[in-house]
Amino acid sequence: MKKSFGLLVGAALIAISGQVAANEAEEIGAKIYDRAFGRGCGACHDIASNPQLKELIKAGKLPKDQFATVLKNGKNGMPKAVEAIMAVGPVKKAGYTEDQAIDAVYSYLSK
Ligand code: HEC
């Protein structure tokens, strides 16, 4: 009885900490979207003629590997963004790797 209660509490704690990490990533993702390049990704992407990232991701038209490739290499009018992303305060503070930072923006945009 005691043992199974302990297991239950353990499982609940693992579920909660996973949720906290996911929320933290989304929050940092939001800060990247607002602050990268000083004016944020939205300075360009909130303009209707540029790719609408949230809509594309929700529609399944922008998989994470394609997203990451464009951030790393740039694409026409889209500047390379990894350096700008890594310079965002909360990313540095969290000690994120490039992949974690890219995942964070992606998970914010997937919401
Ligand atoms: C200076 C304006 C500008 C800024 C700032 C900018 N983008 Fe872009 N981005 C563009 C343009 C323009 C395109 C379309 C490029 C093309 O396909 O020709 C694009 C394309 C993309 C794509 C590819 C979409 C697709 O369908 O393949 C992704 C992903 C992307 N941007 C993410 C971001 C993120 C994340 C940020 C912030 C870190 C950002 N962009 C900041 C202008 C910008």
Image (spheres, rainbow, N blue to C red):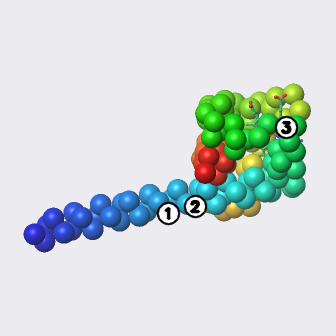
Q: Quadrant of residue 93?
A: bottom right
Q: CA distance from mark 2 to mark 1?
A: 6 Å
Q: Residues within 10 Å of mark 3 (few under 14, many from 20)?
A: few
Residue 10 shows up from this direction: yes
Disc 1 to disc 3: CB gap under 8 Å:
no
Q: Secondary structure at mark 3?
A: loop
In the picture, the disc for residue 45 is: none
Kindly identify the residue that appears in the image at 64 percent across and 60 percent down.
27
Kindly identify the residue that appears in the image at 67 percent across and 54 percent down.
29
Kindly identify the residue that appears in the image at 10 percent across and 69 percent down.
1
Question: Looking at numbered disc 2 in the image, what kind of residue is underneath it?
Answer: Glu
Kindly identify the residue that appears in the image at 59 percent across and 56 percent down.
25
Q: Which residue is mark 2?
A: 24
Q: Residues within 10 Å of mark 2 (few under 14, many from 20)?
A: some
Mark 2 beta carbon near ligand 1 (under 8 Å): no
Residue 67, given in percent of the width and then of the height, sits at 68, 35
Mark 3 beta carbon near ligand 1 (under 8 Å): yes
Residue toward you, 77 or 84: 77
Q: Residues within 10 Å of mark 1 (few under 14, many from 20)?
A: few
Residue 76, given in percent of the width and then of the height, sits at 87, 28
Q: CA distance from mark 2 to mark 3?
A: 28 Å
Q: Which residue is mark 3?
A: 50
Q: Earlier in the sequence, mark 2 or mark 3?
A: 2
Q: Which residue is mark 1?
A: 20
Q: Secondary structure at mark 1?
A: helix
